[in-house]
Image: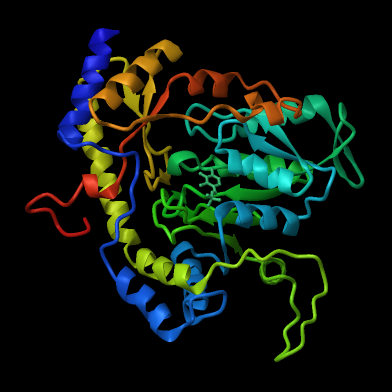
Amino acid sequence: MTDLVAGVVAAVRTVVGDRRAVLHEPLFAGNEWAYVKETIDSSFVSSVGAFVDRFEADLAAATGSAHAVVTGSGTAALHVALVVAGVRPGDEVLVPTLTFAATANAVAHCHATPHFVDVAEATLGLDAHALRAHLERTTRLEATGLVNRETGRPIRAVVPMHAFGHPVDMVPLLAVAEEFGLAVVEDAAESLGSYYHGTHTGTLGLLGTLSFNGNKTITTGGGGAILTRDPALAARAKHLTTTGKLPHPWEYGHDTVAWNYRLPNLNAALGCAQLEQLPALLAAKRRLTARYLDAFAAVPGVRLVTEPAGCRSNYWLQTLLLEEGDRTVRDALLAATHAAGYLTRPVWELLHTLPHFASAPRAATAVAEHLADRLINLPSSAQLAPPAEGDDVGA
Ligand SMILES: *Cc1c(COP(=O)(O)O)cnc(C)c1O
């Protein structure tokens, strides 16, 4: 084990150098300051402004989505996407147990229950084949939709999450969803710039959501977006995220209980500038992956997680997978890298093990459990891989 620990620390040092390196920090290298200043100079810093409309249009263009509705956070985006997809109080929603807490929190915000399922080792994302077997065993299809035979509750939707930017295998998942009458809402919070067989993640399901939190590939300080090809769903999402106000030059008419989940113009300005930088950020992430791959090629017992076949990952977080071992090895690696100034992180605690989700229904989650003991995220900021001398800019 000491060889492994020394080998990993040395490999990270080869890539990162002797400086202290956090897990992920934003990079502001374009028009960020100019656009933010513009909102302050114009006084349009709040919920209305030209940058909000522009950021929505730019996101739609960047992802190939027909529509984009921006929100104050990725969690808010997922909450409203689930509501718009038809999730009602008392429903169950299928989510992977290997994901950030926000995925299941958004379900709970709908007064629905997360129903945890397993992931595939090849993608770290939802395993459609295991899901089908689980649904065949534990549910029945009624005229009104799928019902969990154990709890008697409707199962309304499934939320694949593209972990660390690596696309879930969506074709088999969409087939299972179709067969069992489930709405697909993609949690693409981590996968802006990732493509599944040429299609941007977050645009394959009924709806998809993005996050622009400070640690994501691009940031608005805090923010999110809902993607959909359906104009009626987009209009509904916009209405529900903007207090349900009816358009009128002066009257305060509202037709439903809704949310103030708007993204301020100030944040949208930052988003517009960041989105202009996306190709350069993605190029830097790929250079960083190439350097880590090189460095870890000589370290037996670990491998870098790479994009699934046919997919293009944004490589949001660089991820090391221990081939064998348990938390003892993982924790020794975390301690040694931290001691060397590299702020590595384990993967999230599996959501079904958290106290507030302990009684939630779930499938067997053996793959997620095995993975959770062996995954480590490495320093992943774009600034760790500036173009080398002689590289084509942006290549
Ligand atoms: C970041 C993230 C979110 C949304 O987070 P916000 O901080 O609310 O923007 C949702 N799901 C996953 C998997 C995430 O990583």
Total numbered badges shown on the rendered structure: 0
Query: Image quadrant for the C terminus?
Result: bottom left
Tell me the quarter of the picture where residue 275 sits: bottom left
Tell me the quarter of the picture where residue 102 sits: top right
Horizontally, is 274 left or right of 75 in the view?
left
Q: Residue furthest top?
A: 1
Q: Residue furthest bottom?
A: 249
**Is residue 160 visible in this depiction of the protein?**
no
Q: Residue at x 43, y 20 (%)?
A: 374
Q: Closer to the camera, 85 or 34?
A: 34
* Residue 11 horizontal/vertical position (percent): 20, 26
**Is residue 349 visible in this depiction of the protein?**
yes
Horizontally, is 282 left or right of 66 in the view?
left
Q: Residue at x 54, y 27 (%)?
A: 349
Q: Closer to the camera, 294 or 244?
A: 244
Q: Residue at x 67, y 47 (%)?
A: 106
